[in-house]
Image (cartoon, grey):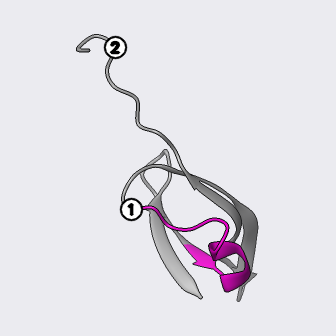
Amino acid sequence: MWFGSFLDVEGGFFDTVHFPNTTKEYPFNGAGCYIIYGKVVEEYGCYASIEVLKFAKLPILGNPLID
C-alpha cells in the first residue's frame, strides 16, 4: 500500500491511498500533475482520503508564447 499527498486546484491538500492491485497498472511517475479517479473515504464523520482506482501523470505543455 502506498500513500500520496496532493494539492487540488484551489490549493487545498488531500491524501490518497494506493493499493497494490491498482499500483502496478497505475504507478507513481515522479513529481507533476496527476489525474486521479477514485472513491472518497469518510472516517469518523470527516472526508479522510481518496482510495485511488485509476491514476495517471498528465503531460506538461510548453508555453506557446515562448516556444
* Residue 37: percent from left, percent from top: 71, 58
Residue that appears at 31% across and 20% down: 63
Quadrant of the frame with the N terminus: bottom right
In the image, 4 versus 13, the foreground residue is 4
Magenta-span inclusion, residue 30? no
Residue that appears at 51% across and 44% down: 58
In the image, 32 versus 42, the foreground residue is 32
Which residue carries the number 1 mark? 30
Return the disc, 1 or 2, that comes first in the chain's sequence.
1
Name the secondary structure under disc 1: loop
Q: Magenta residues, as a range? A: 16-29
Which residue carries the number 2 mark? 64
Horizontal side of residue 57 vs 51, given as left or right: left
Residue that appears at 70% across and 74% down: 22
Give the CA separation, mark 1 to mark 2.
24 Å
Horizontal side of residue 62 vs 9, given as left or right: left
Residue that appears at 61% across and 78% down: 17
User: Quick check: can you spot residue 50?
Assistant: no
The residue carrying pointer 2 sits among few (fewer than 14), some (14 to 19) or many (20 or more) residues within 10 Å by Cα, namely few
In the image, 25 versus 31, the foreground residue is 25
Name the secondary structure under disc 2: loop
Q: Residue furthest front?
A: 24
